[in-house]
Image (cartoon, rainbow, N blue to C red):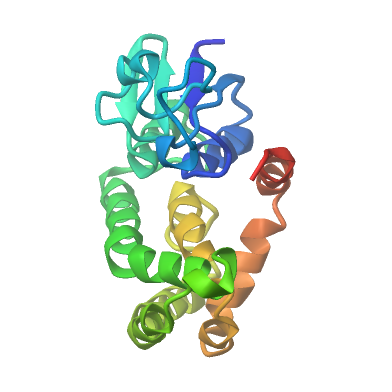
Amino acid sequence: MTLTIYGCYRSRATRNVWLANELGLAFKHVPVIQAYRLADPSAPDAPLHTKSADFLKVNPNGHIPSIDDDGFKLHESLAINLYLARKHGGPLAQKDAKEEGLAVMWSLWAATECETHALNIQYHMAAYPPEKRDPKLVEAALAALPAPFAVLDKVLAEGGGFVMGGRFTVADINVAEIIRYAKPATSLFDAAPHVKAWLDACHARPAFKAMWQAREAEAA
């Protein structure tokens, strides 16, 4: 076992665990919680967190997830997935330079075009208590996301229900794990039926279900 994934399940580490499950990779999971979730990160009995000295030796940026793959350390969840898929090959991997470019493009597209707005929907429509929610952020997200959802919907319709290559790949995982945040806004998915069907199919995969079961078992 040479691969170690650092991060809690209630973080972007879910992307890397899902991919590792898909690839059948054995890995060691080191729980690292976000420092902001702790009442006193400096307490002597505080769990390993993103500002802990031991974790900062792994990722000096103080963010999760990170991996250590037989001594090779890598950060940023989307980059980690692209690396692991490329290293281990198979149908999830980028088969040539064009797919390499497409996988990077779609990962960056999801992160730049969708993630901030999708997270605002997740937080301000579902995760936060009512008194902490900001309707203006929801309104802005609902105004911004129909356009990229329409782009993705068209690509999925033309690509047989997949982001690239006519098959399930690392690009689907990277994009799906961002689009997932917008699920509370059902109107977005009603207007993009191919996106809805694709995300449902992604979440029906055994590797995703195994990751999600572990996430649900983790303390909120």
Residue depicted at 49% across the width and 37% down the height = 39
Across and down, in percent, residue 140 comes to 34, 83
Please tell me which residue lies in front, 115 or 139.
139
Residue depicted at 28% across the width and 56% down the height = 108
Across and down, in percent, residue 112 comes to 27, 63
For the C terminus, the quadrant is top right
Please tell me which residue lies in front, 171 or 43.
43
Q: Quarter-wise, where is residue 79 in the image? A: top left
Across and down, in percent, residue 202 comes to 62, 58
Please tell me which residue lies in front, 176 or 166.
176
Residue depicted at 58% across the width and 88% down the height = 190
- Give left or right: position of 131 versus 112: right
24 lies above or below 11: above
- Give left or right: position of 160 versus 105: right
- Give left or right: position of 143 versus 209: left
For the N terminus, the quadrant is top right
Q: Quarter-wise, where is residue 94 in the image? A: top left
120 lies above or below 108: below
150 lies above or below 102: below
User: How many marks can you see?
Assistant: 0
Residue depicted at 49% across the width and 21% down the height = 48
Across and down, in percent, residue 170 comes to 46, 47
117 lies above or below 205: below
Please tell me which residue lies in front, 56 or 215.
56
